[in-house]
Image (cartoon, coloured by chain):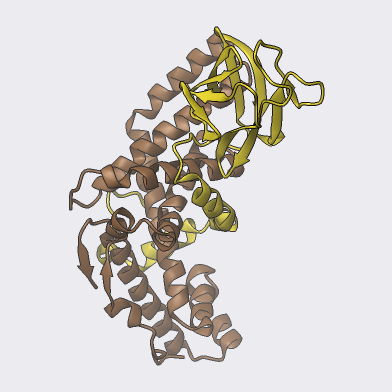
Chain colours: A brown, B yellow
Amino acid sequence: MNSRPPGELTQVSQTRVSLLLRLRHENNEQSWREFYTVYGRLIFGYSLHFNISYAEAEDIVQEVCVKVFRQIGRFDYSPQRGRFRGWLKTITRNTVIDYLRRRQRRKDATQKFQETLEAQFLDYETKVDEEIWAWEWKKTLYENALERVRARVDSGTFKVFRLYALEGMHIDAVVEETGLNANAVYAVKHRILKYIREEVDRLQNEEAFSDQTG
Amino acid sequence: MTRQDETAPEHISDKLMIRDLQAATDSSEVFFSARELSLENMRLSVPSRGDFFDRKSILSFELDGVDVLRVSMCDLPVTVGRGERVDCRLDVEGISRVHCRLERVGGLVRLCDAGSKNGTRVNGKEIEMQDLCEGDTVQIGTACLRVRRM
């Protein structure tokens, strides 16, 4: 299990065209799916901070993605990393606010309650909102990186990592459970963390509106 | 999870990275379980002009600022007309017994003319079917109804 399985790193050496570039020029099912998997998770996590249920957050993800897919061709080109995320945050925030307003309208809110709600929206302008967005982006990065690494390595290797690193099982118990020696378990942990670093880096580069060579 | 402006994994210790990984997986199963349904909704919605209506939305039609028809997304599809057996009855001049239908397509609301005598118009243009947006004006018979999304 210590040796690297054949093909494990083929994805790394591929020339990748940025996800956003593909979304902009091809706008097809595959690029939608990739976008949804990475950024949908970010939108979902952000929405949940506003007293919104899982089902409501799913609807917000869909609405934001539909807006992005319709408007991506008009997005102002810039290779600057993070710029797209700022644009996406604006769309997401406006969609969440619009949703909360409609939800309140459905409940036949009194004028007073509307004013309270407006005051809450103003609070979202603060630094806290930026922190929530950054926090959820970080979670998104790690979660997607972990999923990509899970697909890159064999299930036995991933299980060792899950037990030892993620679930915090004691080294002796992992050795007993997997039949590996302790050095092999440490090596797996080290290798998987290295892969995760690579995937996080790749996910961040996929935001660029330019070709990336991995 | 540590909070930083930009994640720079090469500068994060193994210990911190593991902590971040553990924190990242809290609601992932919920999100990914709905992926296929969400993608299907988007596939239907993206090529259209129509506004996205969430599952709890209420579509309201106003005549001179007064609600004359309200339809919940979960009630769609519905028929609209002056006949006794339609789902939503509107008694205005020039409306057919079964004038039009409202259908749910992905996250959209689609208005379809049901072979009415005087036709159905959206923003002044006669339509056979049209996906609706907030603020659209729908003309059914002599009534000009304004669309609201609630």
Q: Can residue B100 be seen in this view?
A: yes
Q: Is residue B150 visible?
A: no
Asked whether A116 or B58 is in front, the reply is: B58
Residue B84 relative to residue B24: left or right: right
Residue lying at the far right in this picture: please name it.
B84
A30 over B48 or under it: above or below: below
Where in the figure is residue A86, as x and y percent of width and height?
Answer: 29, 42
In front: B7, or A144? Answer: A144
The residue located at (54%, 9%) in the rendering is A111
Quarter of the rendering containing residue A4: bottom left
Residue B37 is left or right of residue A37, and the answer is: right
Along the line of sight, which residue is nearer the eye, A10 or B120? B120
What residue do we see at 42% from left, 70% from top? A148
Residue A173 place in picture, x, y as percent: 58, 81
Indicate the position of residue B141 as horizontal and vertical percent values.
61, 16
User: Is residue B109 shown left or right of residue B87?
Assistant: left
Q: In this view, does B144 lie above or below B150?
A: above
- For the point 70% across and 16% down, which residue is it? B90
Residue at the image position 76 percent from the left and 27 percent from the top: B87
Give residue B39's position: percent from left, percent from top: 52, 54
* Quarter of the image that includes the C terminus of chain B: top right
Which of the pair A194/A184 is nearer the observer? A194
Q: In this view, does A210 lie above or below A75?
A: below
